[in-house]
Image: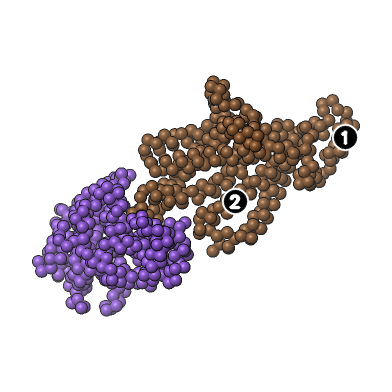
Amino acid sequence: MSPGALLSARDLRVGFATEGGQLQAVDGVSFDLAAGEVLAIVGESGSGKSVTAQTILGLTRSPNARIEGSVQLGGVELLDASDSALRQVRGERIGMVFQDPMTSFNPVYRLGSQIVEAIRAHRGDVSKAEGRARAVELLDSVGIPDAERRVDDYPHEFSGGMRQRAMIAMALALEPEVLIADEPTTALDVTIQAQVLRLLERLNRERGVATILITHDLGVVAEVADRVMVMYAGRVVEEGTLDEIFYDPQHPYTWGLLGSLTRLDRPRPKRLPQISGAPPSLLSLPPGCSFRARCPHEFAKCAEMPPLEARLPDAPSHCDRCWLSPERKRELRQVEGQIGLGAPAR
Amino acid sequence: MARFIVRRLAGMVLVLFAVSVLTFAIFNLIPNSPPAQRLAGKNATPTLVKSIEKDWGFDEPLPVQYFETMKKIFTGELISYGDELNVEERIVEGIPTSFSLCIGAAVIWLSFGILFGFLSATRVGGWLDRALTIGSVGGISIPVFLIATLFLYFLTYKIELFPASGYVPLLEDPIQWAYHLVLPWFTLAILNIGFYSRVLRSNMLDVMREDYVRTARAKGLDERRIMVRHVLRNSLIPIITLFGLDFGATLFGGAIITEVIFSLGGVGQYAAESITNLDLPPLMAITIFGAFFVVLFNALTDVVYAYLDPRIRLGSSAQ
């Protein structure tokens, strides 16, 4: 683990025994999250980003799951932590926000009482009245109007965006060092998405809470992330700073993701480009690079073995897993239509 | 709330009407010797039969007979064909017995059903879950009369642990009351213990997959609290609906066999006697009485349901 990293994963592997066979959801993922940093994990459905996030908190533990590698928070291993040790971390040191705010609150309890429950799970000495006052404060801080009254509402009385803000408030109730937001905007309307992103950004800035933001939406990434990790079929295919990923992408899959964004600064294409095909089944990954079936630039070496991690000499924070040489990639990007080219707008 | 009550009352009247008409119709359609003939006895003269027909109103058209019967039910003047005694008095006499039996059995089946279901669901796949699964499937499969017979054979005949029959009023001697009812209670409850524990187990396994349970876990709650406050609490909502239906149905149907076997002398036993004797008036009265309680418990269930699930609001129009 690199010095200064608050949370770090090394060669994390998560497999599930299913009826169809062993499903390798996460296959050798490593990353570091520094204090106060926002790391975005990007990928399609089934790329293993949610499983990675949930495994950090031990939420994927089950008799059917095989979890290997290492996840350390402040130097303490989490993967083999006891249930009670893990419980100390959940909510207290790492807060988590889930995708669907409609179903992530228990419908039969008042929102405030669910926040109080989160507080009192770790601070037994906090009275219910104190907890409630804190819940009002938290709801107010995430922009719920009239929080004093709304704290006693049931989840169904909140709109989707309000619920997601309440969820963020609950995750931050104990001022954790790390916030994991698993597709926090996916279930929301676009206008509400922006509000929630702004909130996450503000909380990161004001409280310095390190954030892992999981999303499939590069637009979301561009708004808030410091660093980006692109996942495909359980593996990290590219990782770098926001600028490196957006202005100097190295992996053809990242090109595909960027190419399928609508851009206001380019002429409008007749048809929005897409990455053809579908992700491979995680039950039986083909040998070699897992993206090669969909990659327009596949060549003989791709089928031989999975690409190794390659770092660019002039950008040590930027790495990718592709057999194409950096020179060849540059050529291809020129031909492909200017993906990611152009100077960072700073 | 007011609208809810009015709607429910209107529904209740409709149900009672339909049930009483059906019972009356079925009774008059099944092959049967004329009731006047039976009342008069085997060797009665035609004149006697005629006069009984006139006295009891059997010569009137069926709709008139129906209305006469219904009128008598609500004025408490209904007389049975069999022993020519007042029907309502017998029913009122039997009510404490039937309620004692059913409420006790319900408490037992709810407690054990919830306990076993909870244990099964929280230890899914373990040996206790397997044992409880086998036990509950057994409980569902064994017919009530067989359970009763087994109880009687082993617990009253082989070892004389419990009395074989009879009912002691609660106010007379509470200990004897419970002592006499233990076997009937369990006889009646075993089927539902099995059934409720299976239903609760599967509800809980469904709820465990809900997002809000994952949220609860991510908050750092301990497993027991997650299971009780989040999983069990939400899994009980459908159980309440089931209970509302079952309790009413047991009170005036399911309990009949148990009442007869243990000679408790409640409403159920009265119903059994009346069916054997093809005695219409008690059947009509008991049916209406039973339907009334089924509908009443359903309404109560809805009230409890709304309390348990805040998303449901009584009387408000559905969105």
**Earlier sequence position, callout 2 versus callout 1:** 1
> Badge 2 is on which residue?
B300
Task: Tell me how the rendering is colored.
Answer: by chain
Find residue A335 and report its horizontal and vertical position in percent: 18, 71
Q: Which residue is mark 1?
A: B50
State the residue in front, A211 or A121: A121
- Could you tell me residue B89's position as x and y percent? 74, 39
Tell me if residue A37 comes above or below residue A283 in the rendering.
below
Task: Give me the chain that's purple.
Answer: A
State the quadrant of the C terminus of chain A.
bottom left
Disc 2 residue type?
A: Leu
Chain to which the residue tagged by mark 1 belongs: B
Q: Nearer the viewer, residue B218 or A120?
A: A120
Q: Position of residue A84 (x, y in %)?
A: 30, 49
**Mark 2 element type:** helix
Front residue of this view, candidates A190 and B211? B211
Tell me if B116 is positioned left or right of A265 in this view.
right
Which chain is the one coloured brown? B
Front: mark 2 or 1: 2
Residue B305: which disc? none
Q: Respond whether the residues carrying marks 2 and 1 are from the same subunit.
A: yes
Measured Cα–Cα span from mark 2 to mark 1: 48 Å
Which residue, as the protein is rendered here, is positioned at the far left?
A: A313
Q: Quadrant of residue A44?
A: bottom left
Chain that bears disc 2: B
Relative to B138, B277 lies left or right: right
State the residue at coordinates (40%, 58%): A127
